[in-house]
Amino acid sequence: MTRRIGFQGFAAGADVVLSSDGEAGATGGGGWPAQAQAQGGTQQSAEIVLRRSQLQVAPEGINFELVLSGFDTPGPAGGSDVYDPQFHDIYYVWDFGDEGAVFTAPEHVPDAHKNANRGYGPLASHTYQTAGTYTVRCLVIEPSSGKAALAEQDITVGDPDVLFAGDRTIFVSTDPTFARAPAGARTVATGDEAYDLQGTLQGASPGHH
């Protein structure tokens, strides 16, 4: 059974396609619809809020929350245990900008379910395994009204080899050869020695191996 929904904010004649593997976009153009933002006097919008680690280096798990404005579906009436209709009556499709990311642990599930670059719902999370700059997008669709919005956010995940450079690292190992120590690292055999040495290295971060 096919259900047709008219969406505000798209060019005339454009359709939105949500396929079984989570791809979303305007037909004919491919990718994410550039015209998903409100048009024609409507005021709906979506904003991505990030919760990140203190150091912001790879591998980094980032939590995403979408804040909506101008959609017809109301939020919770109040309190932390109140039902939120926006979790069920609005569709959310995330692209974390980390093409090729996959889940390796699941077994006996369709390949589409192993796509770690996709997420659904107003709350989502993703772990970036490598340093770089990523563009996170979330397409929001409200079937009851046809309203849609596209939220977008650029994020930069730092390189741990830059933050924890060898000359800013204390390498602790019981191996007297310290074979795995980064170049330039101070080498010690015990934790007590490491913390004693830390005070002499401005900005150093102890590394335990």
Image: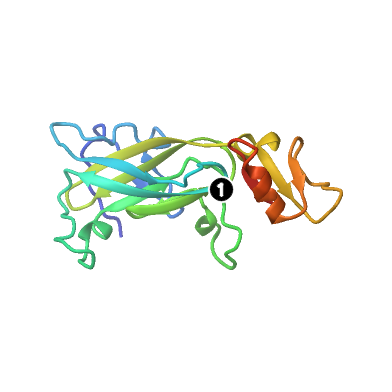
Residue 201 in view (yes/no): yes
Q: Quadrant of residue 47?
A: top left
The crowding category of the residue bearing disc 1, from other C-alpha atoms within 10 Å (few below 14, some 14 to 19, many at least 20), is: some
- Residue at image position (46%, 53%) is 21
Relative depth, front residue between 33 and 172: 172
Q: Secondary structure at mark 1?
A: loop
Q: Nearer the viewer, residue 52 or 145?
A: 52
Q: How far across and down, in percent of the image, does residue 126 sit?
A: 48, 50
Residue 162 against residue 22 in the figure, above or below: above
Residue 67 image offset from top left, x and y in percent: 26, 46
Establish if 104 lies above or below 49. below
Which quadrant is the N terminus positioned in?
bottom left
Residue 82 against residue 30 in the figure, above or below = below
Q: In screen coordinates, is 199 left or right of 96?
A: right
Quarter occupied by residue 160: top right
User: In this orientation, which residue lies closer to the viewer: 167 or 64?
Assistant: 167
Residue drawn at x 51%, y 52% is 116
What residue would you read off at disc 1? 101
Residue 6 visible? The answer is no
Q: Residue furthest right?
A: 177
Residue at x 38%, y 36% (from the top left corner): 153
* In-image side of 56 versus 177 (left or right): left
Question: Which sits in the foreground, 40 or 166?
Answer: 166
Q: Amino acid at mark 1?
A: Ala
35 relative position to 205: left or right: left
Q: Where residue 99 sits: x, y (%)? A: 54, 42
24 lies left or right of 97: left
